Image: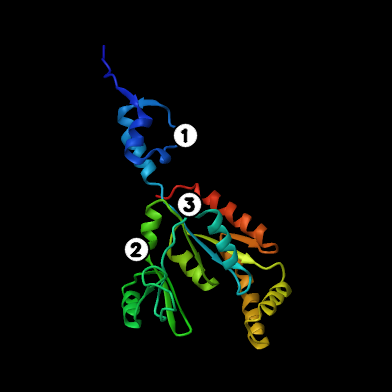
C-alpha cells in the first residue's frame, strides 16, 4: 500500500493578502487550498500588468477631449507619464513635474540610445515619452494613455506588443471641416491641408484595433472608456 503525504491546507486568502495586499485578491479564490499552491497563485497575480492605450485620429476630431474625459472617469486605473521636451518652460511650469525639460543634445543622445517609447518633432522642438517610465507604470499594474497622430500610433503599434490603439473618427469629413473652422486656429489654406490629410488618415483606420465615431463627445468618451475597461481585464505577461 502506498501512503500519500497529507498536504496541509491553510487560509489561502490571508496568506495572499499578506503578500500582495487585500485589494489585489481575486474574489474567486477559495478560502482554503493546499499550501503549496499559494506560491503559484501569488506569482500569477503579481504578473498582471497595465496596458498602453493609444488614441489617434485626424486633427480637430476631438481625440484630446476624449482622452481627457476618459482620464477623468478612470483616474484610478491610469498613471501619468511625464513627457520630455526641448522647448523652453512656460511661466509656472516646473521641471520633472509638468515636463522633463531637456536640451536638444540631451534629447538626441537619448534618441540615439533608443530610450524613447514614442517621440515626435513639432515646430523644431522634440517631444517624447521614455520607455523606462512607461514600463515602470505598466509593471506596477497601471495603464498609460497616449495621444498621437496616425503615424505615431502605427509606429508604436508595430514596435510594442500588447498596445491597444483607438482611432477617433469624425461622423463625416464635412463635420470635421466645420469643427476646424469653428475653433478658429487655422487659415482656410491650412484647413484645406488638414482636411486632405484627414481624408488619407481615415482610410488608414482599419490598421487600428478599435474605431470610435465622435459625433457626440460624451458618447465617444463612454465608448472609449468601455474599450479600455474591457481590454484592461486581459492579463499582460
Dot 1: element: loop
CB atoms of marks 2 and 3 within 8 Å: no
Q: Earlier in the sequence, mark 1 or mark 3?
A: 1
Give the percent coordinates (x, y) of residue 199: 65, 75
Give the percent coordinates (x, y) of residue 44: 37, 41
Residue bearing mark 3: 76
Residue bearing mark 1: 27
Picture residue at 44% right of the left edge, 79% below the top: 90
User: Residue reaching furthest front?
Assistant: 92
Picture residue at 43% right of the left edge, 82% below the top: 125
- In this view, the residue in front, 1 or 36, is 36
CB atoms of marks 1 and 3 within 8 Å: no
CB atoms of marks 2 and 1 within 8 Å: no
Residue bearing mark 2: 132
Q: Earlier in the sequence, mark 2 or mark 1?
A: 1
Q: Quadrant of residue 109?
A: bottom left
Q: Quadrant of residue 38?
A: top left
Q: CA distance from mark 2 to mark 1?
A: 32 Å
- Colouring chosen for the image of the structure: rainbow
Dot 2: element: helix
Q: CA distance from mark 2 to mark 3?
A: 21 Å
Amino acid at each position: 500500500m502506498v501512503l500519500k503525504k497529507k498536504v496541509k491546507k491553510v487560509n489561502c486568502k490571508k496568506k495572499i493578502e499578506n503578500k500582495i495586499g487585500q485589494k489585489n485578491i481575486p474574489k474567486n479564490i477559495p478560502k482554503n487550498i493546499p499550501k503549496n499552491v499559494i506560491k503559484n497563485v501569488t506569482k500569477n497575480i503579481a504578473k498582471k500588468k497595465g496596458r498602453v492605450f493609444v488614441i489617434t485620429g485626424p486633427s480637430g476630431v476631438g481625440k484630446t477631449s476624449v482622452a481627457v474625459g476618459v482620464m477623468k472617469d478612470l483616474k484610478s486605473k491610469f498613471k501619468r507619464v511625464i513627457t520630455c521636451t526641448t522647448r523652453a518652460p512656460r511661466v509656472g511650469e516646473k521641471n520633472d513635474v509638468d515636463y522633463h525639460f531637456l536640451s536638444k543634445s540631451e534629447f538626441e543622445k537619448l534618441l540615439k540610445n533608443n530610450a524613447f517609447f514614442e517621440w515626435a518633432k513639432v515646430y523644431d522642438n522634440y517631444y517624447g515619452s521614455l520607455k523606462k517610465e512607461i514600463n515602470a507604470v505598466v509593471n506596477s499594474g497601471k495603464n498609460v494613455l497616449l495621444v498621437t497622430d496616425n503615424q505615431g500610433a502605427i509606429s508604436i503599434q508595430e514596435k510594442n506588443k500588447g498596445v491597444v490603439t483607438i482611432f477617433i473618427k469624425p461622423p463625416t469629413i464635412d463635420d470635421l471641416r466645420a469643427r476646424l473652422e469653428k475653433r478658429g486656429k487655422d487659415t482656410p489654406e491650412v484647413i484645406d491641408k488638414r482636411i486632405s490629410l484627414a481624408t488619407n488618415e481615415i482610410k488608414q483606420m482599419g490598421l487600428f484595433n478599435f474605431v470610435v465615431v465622435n459625433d457626440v463627445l460624451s458618447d465617444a468618451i463612454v465608448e472609449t472608456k468601455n474599450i479600455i475597461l474591457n481590454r484592461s481585464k486581459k492579463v499582460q505577461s
